[in-house]
Amino acid sequence: MSTKTFASQADLEEKKVSFTQLSPNAYAYTAEGDPNTGIIIGDDCVMVLDTQATPVMAQDVIRRIREVTDKPIKYVLMTHYHAVRVLGASAYGAEHIIASEDTRDLIVERGEQDKASEIGRFPRLFRNVESVPAGLTWPTLTFRGKMTLYLGSLEVQLLQLGRGHTKGDTVAWLPQQKILFSGDLVEFDATPYAGDAYFKDWPQTLDNIAALQPAQLVPGRGAALTTPEQVQAGLAGTRSFIADVYENVKAGVAAGEDLNTVYKRCYAAMAPKYKGWVIFDHCMPFDVTRCYDEVTQYPDPRIWTAERDVEMWKSLEDQH
């Protein structure tokens, strides 16, 4: 594995995009395990959930929205702070960019480092990166816990149901239609990225999502889940992955193993079940490193810099 290109720089294959209608008001823009975008169309305006990574990439989302509605795009929601989710925001010309207060805090604290780190890791996901305006994407509206918007008669609840993928995770819930947009709290046939995660909290947060009993769910990556059975499968798959990383790391730490040994243990235990999931090899070093941090001495995620990414990758890449 030592000849492998750093992280996903070798991942250059274009993914096929789907634009799936879940209801008269809800659509999912998905691309075979690449980051998803959600679209909510109200009586008088549109909300876009997660923007794609660059304004040029966002144009394809806008083109598809315009095939189904000419209503103005008034709101952009950041489900969390990661660059791949927010740097396309300027393309939409939205009146308001909404995020949780916790997400804004993370942008203040680590937005610049995260941006540099993500672009270095995932060049294909930042197509035409030169189209990203200087600086970071800042919310114009923030909330704590819950915010309700009415797009005409359509009720949209923005909820923080707990920490998981990050401390600021926000979901969007259409209570009248029982449709949930989860951001990266839920993935489907795609490996959860957990480099900024709270492993101890994430399963409970998934239980809080399940308690809403969504009939349909748009995950952060992977196909839209359009039946209650598919929703349960998406929640169960994400929950089992997070639990498996956590249990393997905890066992390794209890045995006094160092990070490299814990990584070998974790990879060997999990590859048979999860290797077929999109970006498994990319995510595992970040996921195990963060989990090891959490189990040992860092309750909160450390900041990933471009330099730390490369150091981590070099130390773990030969481990399996």
Image: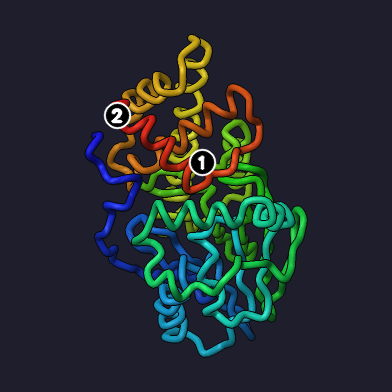
Which residue is at the front of the view, 52 or 111?
111
Which quadrant of the view contains residue 314? top left
Question: Is label 1 or label 2 in front?
Answer: 2
Q: Amino acid at mark 1?
A: Gly
**Which quarter of the image is occupied by the C terminus?**
top left
Percent position of residue 72, x then y: 59, 86
**Which quarter of the image is occupied by the N terminus?**
top left
Side of 273 where 53 appears, left or right: right
Whether 191 is drawn above or below 26: the answer is above
Q: Amino acid at mark 2?
A: Asp
Which residue is at the front of the view, 272 or 266?
266
In three-dimensional space, the C-alpha distance between marks 1 and 2, rounded to whole angstroms, equals 19 Å
Please name the residue shown 60% across and 68% down the image: 135
Percent position of residue 37, x then y: 48, 66
User: Element under label 1?
Assistant: loop
Res. 148 visible in picture: yes
Side of 100 where 191 appears, left or right: left
Side of 50 where 300 appears, left or right: right
Residue at image mark 2: 318
Percent position of residue 58, x then y: 45, 74
Whether 294 is drawn above or below 207: the answer is above
Side of 227 where 164 appears, left or right: right
User: Element under label 2?
Assistant: loop
Q: Residues within 10 Å of mark 2 (few under 14, many from 20)?
A: few
Q: Residues within 10 Å of mark 1 (few under 14, many from 20)?
A: many
Percent position of residue 150, x then y: 71, 74
Res. 226 visible in picture: no
Residue at image mark 1: 195
Residue farthest to the front, as pictured:
307
